[in-house]
Each structure stands twice: as C-alpha cells, then as structure tokens.
Image: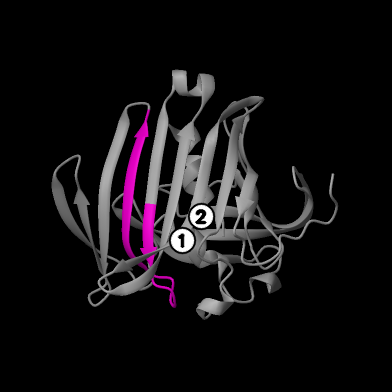
Amino acid sequence: MKKFQLLALLFLSFSAYSQDETAFGVGEWFKFRIHYGFVNAGYATLEVKEATINSENRFHLIGKGYTTGLSRFFFKVDDRYESYIDKETFVPIQFLRQINEGGYTKNQEGFFIWSSNKVFIKDFKNKTEKTFSIPKKTQDILSAFYYLRNLPNIDKIKPGESVAIDLFFDDETTKFRLKFIGRDDVKTKFGIVSTMIFRPLVQSGRVFKEEESVTVWISDDENRIPVRIQASLAVGSIKADLDAYKGLKKPFKVKQND
C-alpha cells in the first residue's frame, strides 16, 4: 500500500564522526503516530541496540510499523526492518526486511560485501539468492536514516541545496536526495520545536516518484530527529508525528512547553 511507504520515507528522513560524537547511541527509541486525516492509522518505532556480527560490535537498528484499530481491520500492516551498521563508518553490514501490507509480503535478508562492492540478497519468500553490484558506501533503507543524521556540517546547508546518498532498495540502487527547504518552528505534543525542513528527491523511474510531495521536519539540534513527516496524496494527506521518545544522546530542545 503506497500510503504505508511513508514508513520507508520515515527511515530516510536524517564523513562520519567518532562514536562519542554520533547524534545517536544505544538505547535511543522513538515512536511515531501515523494518521490519515483525522484517523489514527498506526504507529512506527525506531530503536538502537547493540549486537556482535562476525566478532565485531555493531549498532543494531530496528524499525517497525503497524496499523491499529479500524485501519488494521481494513488493511493490516506489520512491517519490520533491521540493519547492522559499522560504529565508525555507519556503512551497513547486514539487513533484514519483513513486510506484510494487506497480504503483500516480503521477506529478505541482505549481506554487504564491501571487499567487492556487492550485496548478497536472500529472498525467503521466492526462495532465490541474488548478488548485486553497488557503489561504495551504499545504504539500505534503515541505515540511511542514521547515516544522514551524522553528516558533518549539515547545519550550514542553504535553502535549495541538497544532500545525496546511494540507496539499495527493492533489488536496485537509486540516488536518494534530500533538498533543504528552510527552517521553521513546529508545534508538537512536547512543545514548540525548531526544525530544518527537507523534501526527498529521487531519480524518476526508481522506487520513489520524483515529486516534491513529501516534507520532513528535522529537529534543529544535535539529535537531528524527525518530528513530523507529511506526504500529499491524490486525495488528502498522511502524516507521521513524533509521539514518544527515550534514550536521546543529547537534550531535546523545546522552545516552549504547552
């Protein structure tokens, strides 16, 4: 369901620093409320844990999305994304993608082979195995979110400028771009938050359409977390708002409490 591809965009909303200078750390957790008009459609969560892969300590990233209430009755969504990334370079080592959207399912596991710039994909649903060539530092759908949050000097970007990464998604690599629109204050359940506004742009004919129909508001502080995402649809719009959080590495700056 295209409405719930917003979950994928949520993971993309925002070189590397040392571990002590990252915008996130182990224990960080967010919850977002996804609503379509006045209807509470579901929730999405993002979490950072630790794991050992091939005797190396990695960040273990977990993203989940699911429908609730009547939305679940009419269209059940249960999505799970996982990614293991290097703590110093933030490049992905391994990822997992399990989705169930109204009966459409996908169950894949990917392994990045950086010595040859390839990714090996196991498709458990279709019982296939494929290898794809990829550019250096290519990100998966979930690792991209954390990689972008740690780009240096992002606070110095000017309106109209954009940042870009190579993204591997649905068995292909696309050039994913975030165009900086400007700054604004956003009213949230936590108070007024200063934000940086971005719009995702990608090459036409790829996973996403090349339209400025999605807007992302990122906290203008050291955390760089998405506080709101809005996507314009043919009829109405769908939004995701930050609903709860814990374990932030830096204080969450709120200009005014309600």
- In reply to whether residue 88 is colored magenta, the answer given is yes
Residue located at (51% from left, 27% from top): 68
Helix, strand or loop under label 1:
helix
* x and y, in percent, of residue 140 in the image: 38, 58
Q: Which mark is residue 24?
A: none
- In reply to whether residue 191 is colored magenta, the answer given is no
Mark 1 near mark 2, Cβ–Cβ under 8 Å? yes
* x and y, in percent, of residue 18 in the image: 52, 81
Label 2: few (<14), some (14–19) or many (≥20) C-alpha neighbours in 10 Å: many
Residue located at (35% from left, 34% from top): 100
Helix, strand or loop under label 2:
helix
Count of residue discs: 2
- Of residues 75 and 50, the one drawn nearer to the viewer in this rendering: 50
State the image quarter where residue 220 is shown: bottom right
User: Is the residue 52 above or below the residue 31 in the image?
Assistant: below
State the image quarter where residue 178 is shown: bottom right
Gap in angstroms between the C-alphas marked 1 and 2: 6 Å
Left or right position of 212 against 68? right
Left or right position of 257 against 78? right
Q: Which residue is mark 1?
A: 144
- Of residues 38 and 175, the one drawn nearer to the viewer in this rendering: 38
Q: Amino acid at mark 2?
A: Leu
Q: Which residue is mark 2?
A: 12
Residue located at (54% from left, 37% from top): 43
Question: Can the viewer see residue 15?
Answer: no
- Of residues 109 and 189, the one drawn nearer to the viewer in this rendering: 189
Q: Amino acid at mark 1?
A: Ala
The magenta stretch is 82-101
User: Is the residue 218 above or below the residue 53 in the image?
Assistant: above
